[in-house]
Image (cartoon, grey):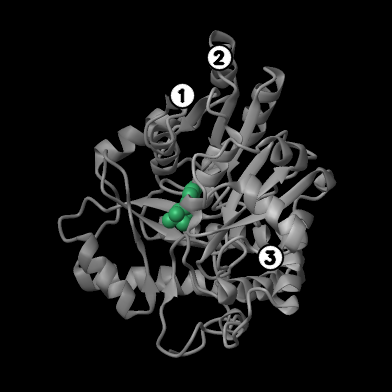
């Protein structure tokens, strides 16, 4: 692969992952995994402590009220830990769903036998603050609201500020799944009122998979004792153990933690949340402009487009087929992500990971070549897809 970017190509012959995690990591992050750590050893304990402090720092003003509790497993394990540890057995949650991850949060609550209601906005309409306020006013039994920050299944950046305002005004507790946004989109107690938020190692901090982490109010962590439905996913217990021993309660993903600490250094060097967010936003802008020039259309209106991942409609042209498009893009070094819409065929392109504007321009150029090779004359989506999109305009 010829170098096409000031960022080093991930590795000779290795494709760029245009996916929302696992994603393309730097050589330094990968290299950090080439040593073994004793989980009880002081060196690893210091690594964990530094990581926890570094993550709390990303919250900015107001961070001192919060602590970081890492949790082994993929992001969903940390979401389950957050829901089970902070929503007591007698509580009731309102889940704001507009895609697969909101649905998964609701399903998790079903497994946990936690009472809940769902505001289901379908595949990609945003839950609005006034709707949340109405539902909370109508049901005083609701104690917690669960919101998805960037719903990665469509790429929509949900209006978390107005949601936080509505929840706080009603005196309820907000829990945020900021899995795919944290690190690139500001999440700060300065602007948002929340008890806990969750993210994971392999999203915007650009580490490798292996664990998630919850940033939670210390008072909420202290009060969570005895809530958890699960031994291994008890955030209070993990927190209390870490505070006491500076060790993880059970075997930590040592190599993934070492890689993540390296990734945090790079995040800081890039200018923290603002710097990372600016690169991703430029990635998105270059990608969207280029794809639109080829005739593709985005599912979402510009104001809802996240700098994380973008959904494009598949062209209506009968010469287009996504599996062949995918294979040809992969042959050019780019791994795409299939779509998840029920209404129209679509695919997604991630903007996160070790990629910059030069890589995104190469993605667009490759897409143009592949369309030509396939004999696709127009990348315009079918009319029903555009009709669906018009529904979003409200
Ligand atoms: C990635 C992601 C998750 C967690 O998914 P895992 O596959 O369990 O890591 C949860 N919520 C959102 C919004 C995500 O993007």
In this figure, which residue is indicated by the disc labeled 2?
Answer: 141
The reply to whether dot 1 and dot 2 touch (C-beta < 8 Å) is yes
The reply to whether dot 3 and dot 1 touch (C-beta < 8 Å) is no
Under circle 1, the secondary element is: strand
Under circle 3, the secondary element is: loop
> Residue 277 location, x and y as percent?
66, 57
**Neighbour tally class for label 1: few under 14, some 14-19, many 20 plus, Cα within 10 Å:** some
In this figure, which residue is indicated by the disc labeled 1?
Answer: 115
In this figure, which residue is indicated by the disc labeled 3?
Answer: 247
Asked where in the image residue 36 lies, by quadrant, the reply is bottom right
C-alpha separation, residue under disc 3 versus residue under disc 1: 33 Å
As displayed, is residue 343 above or below residue 262? above
Q: Nearer the viewer, residue 326 or 376?
A: 326
As displayed, is residue 28 above or below residue 81? below
Please tell me which residue is depicted at 59% across the width and 27% down the height of the picture: 144
Q: Nearer the viewer, mark 3 or mark 1?
A: 3
């Amino acid at each position: 692969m010829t170098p096409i970017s000031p960022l080093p190509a991930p590795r000779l012959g290795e494709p760029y992952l245009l996916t929302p995690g696992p994603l393309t990591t730097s050589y330094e992050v990968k290299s950090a995994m080439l040593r073994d750590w004793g989980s009880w050893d002081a060196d690893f304990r210091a690594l964990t402590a530094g990581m926890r402090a570094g993550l709390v720092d990303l919250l900015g003003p107001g961070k001192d009220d919060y602590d970081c509790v890492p949790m082994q497993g993929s992001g969903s394990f940390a979401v389950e830990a957050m829901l089970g540890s902070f929503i007591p057995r007698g509580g009731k949650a309102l889940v704001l769903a507009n895609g697969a991850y909101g649905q998964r949060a609701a399903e998790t609550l079903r497994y946990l036998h936690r009472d809940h209601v769902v505001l289901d906005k379908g595949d990609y309409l945003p839950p609005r603050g006034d709707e949340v306020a109405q539902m909370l006013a109508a049901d005083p039994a609701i104690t917690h609201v669960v919101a998805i920050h960037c719903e990665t299944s469509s790429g929509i950046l949900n209006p978390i500020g107005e949601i936080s305002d509505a929840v706080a005004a009603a005196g309820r507790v907000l829990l945020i799944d900021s899995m795919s946004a944290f690190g690139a989109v500001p999440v700060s107690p300065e602007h948002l009122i929340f008890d806990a938020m969750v993210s994971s190692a392999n999203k915007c901090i650009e580490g490798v998979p292996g664990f998630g982490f919850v940033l939670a109010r210390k008072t909420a962590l202290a009060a969570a004792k005895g809530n958890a439905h699960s031994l291994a996913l008890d955030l209070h217990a993990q927190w209390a153990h870490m505070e006491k021993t500076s060790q993880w309660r059970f075997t930590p993903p040592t190599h993934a933690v070492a890689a993540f600490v390296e990734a945090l250094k790079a995040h800081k060097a890039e200018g923290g949340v603002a710097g990372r967010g600016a690169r991703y936003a430029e990635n998105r802008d270059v990608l969207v402009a280029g794809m639109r020039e080829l005739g593709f259309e985005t599912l979402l209106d510009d104001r809802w487009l996240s700098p994380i991942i973008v959904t494009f409609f598949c062209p209506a042209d009968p010469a287009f087929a996504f599996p062949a498009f995918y294979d040809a893009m992969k042959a050019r070094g780019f791994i795409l992500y299939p779509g998840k819409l029920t209404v129209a065929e679509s695919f997604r392109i991630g903007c996160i990971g070790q990629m910059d504007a030069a890589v995104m321009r190469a993605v667009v150029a490759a897409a143009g070549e592949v369309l030509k090779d396939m004999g696709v004359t127009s990348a315009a989506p079918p009319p029903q897809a555009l009709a669906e999109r018009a529904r979003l305009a409200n």
